[in-house]
Amino acid sequence: MTRVLMNRWLASRWAKPLAFLLALLPFAWLVLAAVMDWLGANPAEALERSTGDWTLRMLCVVLAITPLRNSLALNSLARFRRMAGLFVYFYAVLHLFAYSWFDMGFELLDVAKDITKRPFVLVGFSAVVLLTPLALTSFSRAMRILGGRRWQMLHRLVYPVAVLALVHFFWMRAGKNNFAEVAVYAIILGGLLGWRLQHFIRRNAA
């Protein structure tokens, strides 16, 4: 009975607007904090770190939707996957924007040089590049143009994106010798990717 009610609520007209507002709250908070000068002694670093953190969190949400839908029989969760994926891209672009602005002063030549010189920047930039075609083809029309099989293959790029994002985060934290959060995300993403691998093996063995 609880599962039925949950599916009905997830399928209701209010569920997606509420999910949209919840996903937008971190951005609204960052804007408010910047305006009110609540970001501490180094607001630029706080904005870069926060947008990067929320990119990883939204990536975990995206990858958790299918396992939760299958394990709990919450089929209505599937309707939130596109929105969650676009929010991953939204926060990733904000993270790149913050880095380009605060670290590089929007000097594109300096950004390009930094990408080639610093591996952790290259890895993070590569993740954003791979996310771009996923965001651009996240709509139903793109699926019809590409065809279901090619669309699915393209959107499997989210898996290397998850690995790149985790490596980027690891290198960021390595400078401060702080790996506690990295371990948390590694466990979560490892579990979610491991579930998909197990599901793939079972499906092909059947």
Image (cartoon, rainbow, N blue to C red):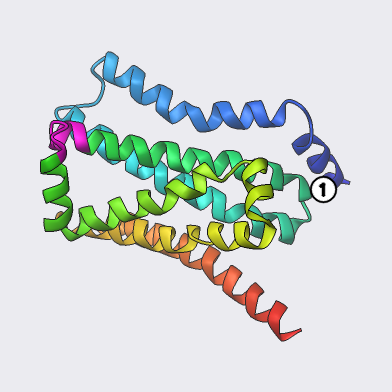
Question: Where 114 sits versus 94, above or below?
Answer: below
**Amino acid residing under circle 1:** Arg
Left or right of 181? Residue 82 is right
Q: Residue at x 71, y 85 (%)?
A: 205
Left or right of 106? Residue 51 is right
Q: Residue at x 58, y 74 (%)?
A: 197
Question: Where 116 sits versus 128, above or below?
Answer: below
Q: Does the magenta portion include 105?
A: yes
Disc 1 target residue: 3
> For the residue carrying disc 1, how many other residues have a C-alpha within 10 Å: few (<14), some (14-19), or many (20+)?
few
Q: How far from the left and from the top, in percent, is residue 115?
A: 18, 52
Q: How far from the left and from the top, in percent, is residue 8?
A: 83, 38
Pick the front one: 83 or 64: 83
Q: How far from the left and from the top, in percent, is residue 156?
A: 54, 62
Q: Please, which residue is most extreme toward the right here? A: 1
Pick the front one: 28 or 109: 109
Q: How many discs appear?
A: 1
Q: Helix or strand or loop: what does disc 1 sit on?
A: helix
Q: Does the magenta portion include 31?
A: no
**Range of residues picked out in magenta:** 100-108
Q: Residue at x 61, y 32 (%)?
A: 19
Q: Please, which residue is most extreme toward the top here? A: 36
Q: Quadrant of the C terminus?
A: bottom right
Left or right of 148? Residue 92 is left
Question: Where 179 sits versus 2, above or below?
Answer: below
Q: Please, which residue is most extreme toward the front here? A: 145
Q: How far from the left and from the top, in percent, is residue 62?
A: 55, 50
